[in-house]
């Protein structure tokens, strides 16, 4: 579903744009993804709308033959990329699962701020962004997905999620479309 509006109480959620993850080769140039997310963060802040920076700091417990469970990360792995210009008022959600809502208190934080809509960007489209979008949808938030401000290590996974999954979870749009709606406020 194409982007039609932003609720007055919208929040931006930027998923996993951190040093350890942005170093991976991806389907789209990471500099472009980070640049678009940074523009969105600047504009949300200028409108006094919440910005949520999500990072992954560990892995979920349980069986995982691919080495995910119990994995350790380098010291600076979870640091947000400097282009996001993290501000004291930003909400930080550090996660150990794919989605930003599990075990982070993010849902309650957004509810306390009366947020009704989340605008999601980041990496990876088919993992962190999709899982966060699913959780937000299940929690009853209006979901908007900024498809040109996200990427994946797998181009096919990115394309599948954008074309088949996201339309079932909410509205999709570009950075410019979101910025235009913000400017019209």
Image (spheres, rainbow, N blue to C red):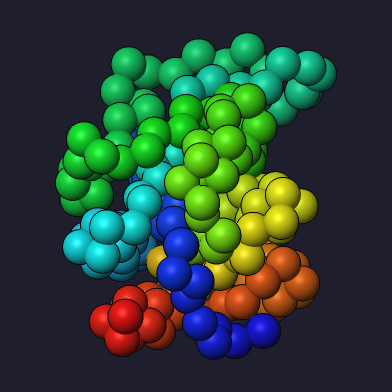
State which quarter of the image contains the C terminus: bottom left
Lateral position of residue 65 relative to residue 176, left or right: right
At x 72% / y 67%, what residue is drawn? 169
Q: Nearer the viewer, residue 42 or 35?
A: 42
Q: Residue furthest toward the right?
A: 63
Lateral position of residue 175 relative to residue 107, left or right: left
Residue 52 lies, in percent from the top left, at: 40, 45
Q: Nearer the viewer, residue 180 or 148?
A: 180
At x 37% / y 38%, what residue is drawn? 91
At x 32% / y 16%, what residue is drawn? 75
At x 61% / y 77%, what residue is drawn? 171
Q: Is residue 180 above or below residue 10?
A: below
From where the camera sits, is residue 159 visible? Answer: no
Q: Nearer the viewer, residue 155 or 144?
A: 144
Residue 90: image quadrant is top left
Q: Is residue 49 above or below residue 1?
A: above
Q: Is residue 155 above or below residue 50?
A: below
How many discs appear?
A: 0
Residue 48 lies, in percent from the top left, at: 27, 58
Residue 145 lies, in percent from the top left, at: 55, 68
Residue 137 lies, in percent from the top left, at: 71, 57
Residue 35: image quadrant is bottom left
State which quarter of the image contains the N terminus: bottom right
From where the camera sits, is residue 7 visible? Answer: yes
Lateral position of residue 52 relative to residue 67, left or right: left
């Amino acid at each position: 579903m194409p982007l039609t509006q932003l609720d007055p109480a919208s929040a931006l959620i930027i998923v996993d744009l951190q040093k350890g993850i942005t170093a991976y080769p991806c389907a789209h140039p990471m500099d472009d993804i980070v640049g678009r997310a940074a523009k969105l963060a600047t504009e949300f802040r200028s409108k006094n709308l919440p910005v949520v920076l999500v990072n992954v700091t560990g892995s979920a417990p349980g069986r995982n033959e691919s080495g995910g469970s119990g994995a350790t990360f380098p010291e600076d792995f979870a640091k947000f990329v400097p282009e996001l210009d993290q501000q004291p008022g930003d909400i930080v959600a550090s996660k150990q699962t794919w989605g930003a809502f599990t075990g982070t208190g993010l849902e309650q934080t957004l509810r306390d701020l009366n947020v009704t809509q989340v605008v999601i960007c980041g990496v990876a489209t088919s993992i962190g962004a999709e899982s966060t979008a699913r959780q937000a949808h299940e929690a009853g938030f209006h979901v908007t997905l900024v498809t040109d401000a996200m990427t994946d290590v797998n181009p096919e996974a990115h394309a599948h999620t954008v074309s088949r999954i996201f339309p079932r979870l909410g509205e999709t749009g570009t950075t410019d479309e979101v910025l235009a709606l913000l400017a019209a406020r």
